[in-house]
Image (cartoon, rainbow, N blue to C red):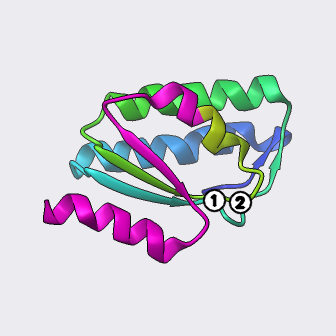
Amino acid sequence: MPDIRQPELTQVSYCLGIIIETVNNYHIRSLLLDCSRSVIEVEDGSYNTIAREFATALRATRLKRLAWVVAPKARLYSALRKEMNPPIELMGFYDKAEAKEWLLQLESA
């Protein structure tokens, strides 16, 4: 995930758009986003707008599960959790291996 800073918001939206486009084009059902090293330096209003738009776009895809490797104070994860609801399962992890394992459970089911 890209860093989220006020002067770079258009780049952040562009990067998130690429993620959505890839999920759509390749019919991805399971996605792992590693935000453990992301830097977030924006106002809450801008941040919530980004999260809402990203969640809305994700809900319009075939995505079933989203594993999120989070930093201890991951605001985007919290904001997305409010927006996602079914049909996409969203689970936060502090460890990438655990996130991968959870995602692979869907594939073997």
The residue lying at 56 percent from left, 28 percent from top is 82
- Residue kind at label 2, given as amino acid type: Ala
What residue sits right under mark 1 in the picture? 35
Whether the magenta-drawn stretch holds residue 97 is answered as yes
Q: Is residue 23 shown left or right of residue 74? A: left
Q: Quadrant of the C terminus?
A: bottom left
Q: Quadrant of residue 85?
A: top left
Taking the image as shown, residue 34 lies to the left or right of residue 21, namely right
Q: Residue most toward the left?
A: 109
As rendered, which of 47 and 67 lies closer to the eye?
67
Q: State the predominant SS element of the stretch in magenta.
A: helix
Find disc 2 in the rendering and name its residue. 71
Q: Secondary structure at mark 1?
A: loop
Name the residue: 30% across, 31% down: 87
**First reached walking from the N terminus: tag 1 or tag 2:** 1
For the residue carrying disc 1, how many other residues have a C-alpha within 10 Å: few (<14), some (14-19), or many (20+)? some
Residue 108, quarter of picture:
bottom left
The percent coordinates of residue 28 (x first, y second) are: 26, 52
Residue visible at 69% across and 27% down? 48
- Counting from the top left corner in percent of width and height, residue 93 is at 55, 61
Magenta residues, as a range? 80-109
Q: Is residue 45 magenta?
A: no
* Image quadrant where residue 81 sits: top right
Inspect the image, locate mark 1, and give the three-letter code of the amino acid beneath it: Cys
Q: Is residue 62 above or below residue 26?
A: above
Q: Position of residue 35 (x, y in %)?
A: 63, 59
